[in-house]
Image (tube, grey):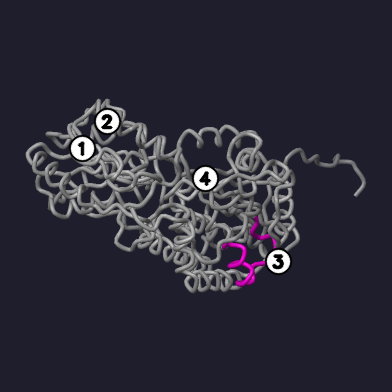
Amino acid sequence: MTETSLESRTPAGLPEKIRHYIGGKFVDSLDGDEFDVLDPVTNRPYLRAASGKKTDVDRAVAAAKKAFDHGPWPHMLPRERSRVLHRIADIMESRGDQLAAMECFDTGLPITQAKGQAARAAENFRFFADLIVAQHDDAFKVPGRQVNYVNRKPIGVAGLITPWNTPFMLESWKLAPALATGNTVVLKPAEFTPLSASLWPGIFEEAGLPTDVFTMVHGYGEEGFAGDSLVKHPDVPLISFTGESGTGQLIFANAAPHLKGLSMELGGKSPALVFEDADLDAAIDATIFGVFSLNGERCTAGSRILVQRSVYDEFVERYARQAANVRVGLPSDPATEVGAIVHPEHFEKVMSYVEIGRSEARLVAGGGRPEGFEEGNFVQPTVFADVAPDARIFQEEIFGPVVAITPFDTDEEAVALANNTKYGLAAYIWTNDLRRAHTVAQNVEAGMVWLNSNNVRDLRTPFGGVKASGLGHEGGYRSIDFYTDQQAVHITLGEVHNPVFGKQEPPADSAR
């Protein structure tokens, strides 16, 4: 490996320290606590970040609540908010190279993929900027008697807790609809990857977002720290969370006393079903990309590949050969296809599953560090074949460049295997039989299904999972629904005939 020094890879515009953003200013934690942020290529600290606690969350929420209760943002016309969101997208696009460089440096994502994520982040803001202007709500008429209509209102302070795999893009996925609908927000970025989030304040200030409509607290999620304190805060009625399922369960429990609105995209162990009549060239290309892009740290990764037995041997041999040719390299190299795992803790987790897989299945590609990468968090694209349905590498989310391949005989067996995990986020089906495609798709337990396709998103469609993969859906009008209260207003027309309860008639001999 060459060019490993921090100095040679450090992106332009690196701050001296990551701080919270409250009251239109970057601020330290009230207790002064900080933590190291590591470079995934070397695991050396490259800066310090403020570690938020309950007191820091309290002041961020207080600022955001004041901006909601007394500021202009919730009361602006949709077109006015839309203009601000479009300016945000313009600024993001003008800084795309800087965004991508910071994301690449902080996460270990390959630079070409980081550029794609930066572009997608800008598109998220444009999409919701357009949607809030074009949206309409229902009106219901009872001729001559009544008109009823729906009035949408922003809810208040939205707590946004985001993951480390594609941090800036996933922050935009929550920020754009929360802001578009008139809410104020407190963002808690992932502690592993706080760098690109430090760019949001400058973008928002330049775009003209009013002060404290956006606030941000960095730090850990554990009890007493930033994430836990945000979930439990009584003045935060909404929590949108993306992360692993165990943390989602804790958030569910901690949000219950306040009956908070929750949207949670959680873990995945998504199947890719390859039938004997599939286009194997397309299926192999797509499933290679689907599990090894983003370093395998993708919630919708097709990390279980189920292949019909008649083409199983050919598929495994070709898949292993192609996986072995996936280029591992420095994240900053445009030729790199798999970079560095985000953090040494996660690297150890992924490598522990590689060792588990060696005892459970047949290793056909990868299985260790790539040659020449003795430091940092580099993992070879790893492929296990003949994986049993009860194997841990079949059942448990690894969230790295590791795939399990399992054979099946019948359509019914394929569906049973696909559904044989606690997860249900995504599924991919490869077949040229139209009847089979739709039948299998409707029987697979997954929130999203792609037929003969890689993970191609349409922002209008619902995004979310079933079972242990999530609660609720976002995307398109589902995001608008989550970030607004819907109030029904009823208007009576014409003469009112109200029922009378308990009315006393005057006595017959009473004075008139």
Counting residues from the start of the chain, the first of labels 3 and 4 encountered is: 3
Among the 4 quarters of the image, the one containing residue 239 = top right
* Camera-nearest label, 1 or 2: 2
Tell me the CA gap for discs 1 and 3.
55 Å
Amino acid type of the residue tagged 4 in the rendering: Phe
First of labels 1, 4 by sequence position = 4
Residue 241: mark: 4
Vertical placement of 116 versus 468: above or below? below
Q: Quickly name the residue at label 3.
A: 72
Residue at image position (9%, 48%) is: 277
Classify mark 2: residues with Cα within 10 Å, few (<14), some (14-19) or many (20+): many
State how far apart marks 4 and 2 are (Cα).
30 Å
Question: Which secondary structure lies at badge 1?
Answer: strand
Specify the label residue 405 is tagged with: 1
Disc nearer the start of the sequence (1/3): 3
Q: Mark 1 belongs to which amino acid?
A: Ile
On the rendered structure, is 50 left or right of 330?
right
Residue 68 in the figure: left or right of residue 11: right
Of the numbered discs 4 and 2, the one sitting upstream in the chain is: 4
Q: Is residue 381 magenta?
A: no
User: What's the residue type where badge 2 is placed?
Assistant: Gly
Give the secondary structure at mark 3: loop
The total of numbered circles placed on residues is: 4
Viewer-nearest residue: 120 or 338: 338
Residue 408, given in percent of the width and then of the height, sits at 15, 34
Which stretch is magenta?
Answer: 199-215
Closer to the camera in the image, 368 or 252: 368
Q: For the residues marked 3 and 2, what is the alpha-carbon distance in whole angstroms?
A: 56 Å
Q: Which residue is mark 2?
A: 357
